Amino acid sequence: MKTSITRIAAASTPLVLLLALAAADTAAEVINVGPSGFLLKHEIIVNLTPEQAYKTLVSDVGSWWNPAHTYSGNAKNLSIDARPGGCFCEQLPNGGGVQHLAVVYAMPGKVLRMTGALGPMQGSGLAGSMTWQITPAAGSTADKPASKMEMSYSVGGYMQGGFDKMAPAANGMLAEQIGRLKNFANTGKPD
C-alpha cells in the first residue's frame, strides 16, 4: 500500500503537515503501514561526491540534525561511529547517553546501515533497520559532482496503539532531518 506523504500529512497533525511541507524538495514516502510495522523511504540529491556525502552524513551529524529532535537539546552531542558495532549516539549530562541506532554495516562512500528504534519508539518492543545508499547522481561530473542519497527505514514489532499514527510522525521527523542534511550538504547551513 503506497501512500504519499501529502495524503498522510493531511490526515495527521498540523506538525506533521508542517514538517512534510518543509521537506517538500525531498522525495519522501511512507511505503507501507501494517499491523506489525512500517517502511519509509527518502531520497535527496546533494552536490557532493559519494565519499563527501557519506562523510557529511556521518561526521557532520551534529551540524545538520535538528536539536529539537535530541534528548539533550543540542545536536552537537550527536555522533556516528561508522563501523560495525559503532553507535549513532548522544551524550547526556553527568555521563549519561542515548544509543539512537547501532551501526551494523559501513562501506564508506556507499552504504551505512544502522539498527534500532528511534525516539519514542525505543520504549516499545520494536526493531528497526535504517539503510543509507549513496551513488553518483545522473549527470554527475568531476567538475560538478552530485550524489543520490537514498534512505530506507523499516520498523517492526509490537507497539501499543499500532503504527497508523507513528509511521507518518516518524516520516515527518525524518523528512525534516533529511531536508536539513540536503541543505547543509549544498549550502553549509541546515536551515
Image: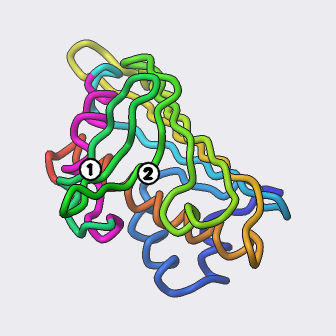
Please tell me the numbered disc located at residue 29: none
Residue 137 at x, y percent in the picture = 43, 25
Q: How many marks?
A: 2
Q: Could you tell me which residue is drawn at 24 percent across and 41 percent down?
A: 185
Nearest the viewer among 136 and 81 is 81
Q: Quadrant of residue 95?
A: bottom left
- Residues marked 2 and 1 touching at CB (< 8 Å): yes
SS class, disc 2 = strand
Amino acid type, residue under disc 2 in the picture? His
Above-or-below relation of 53 to 12: above
| Extent of the magenta region | 52-70
Residue 127 at x, y percent in the picture = 66, 49
> The N terminus lies in which quarter of the figure?
bottom right
Q: Quadrant of residue 191?
A: bottom left
- Spot the residue most to the front: 94
Nearest the viewer among 56 and 6 is 56
| Type of secondary structure dominating the magenta stretch | helix
Label 2 crowd bin: few (<14), some (14–19), many (20+), radius 10 Å:
many
Q: Could you tell me which residue is drawn at 50 percent across and 87 percent down?
A: 14
Please tell me the numbered disc located at residue 78: 1
Amino acid type, residue under disc 1 in the picture? Leu
Distance between the alpha carbons at the discs numbered 2 and 1: 9 Å
Would residue 174 appear left or right of 177 to someone viewing this image? right
Residue 63 at x, y percent in the picture = 19, 50
Nearest the viewer among 95 and 65 is 95
Is residue 57 magenta-colored?
A: yes
Q: Could you tell me which residue is drawn at 24 percent across and 60 percent down?
A: 92
Q: Could you tell me which residue is drawn at 29 percent across and 62 percent down?
A: 66
Closer to the chain start, of discs 2 and 1, is 1
Nearest the viewer among 174 and 87 is 87
* Residue at image mark 2: 100
Q: How is the image coloured?
A: rainbow
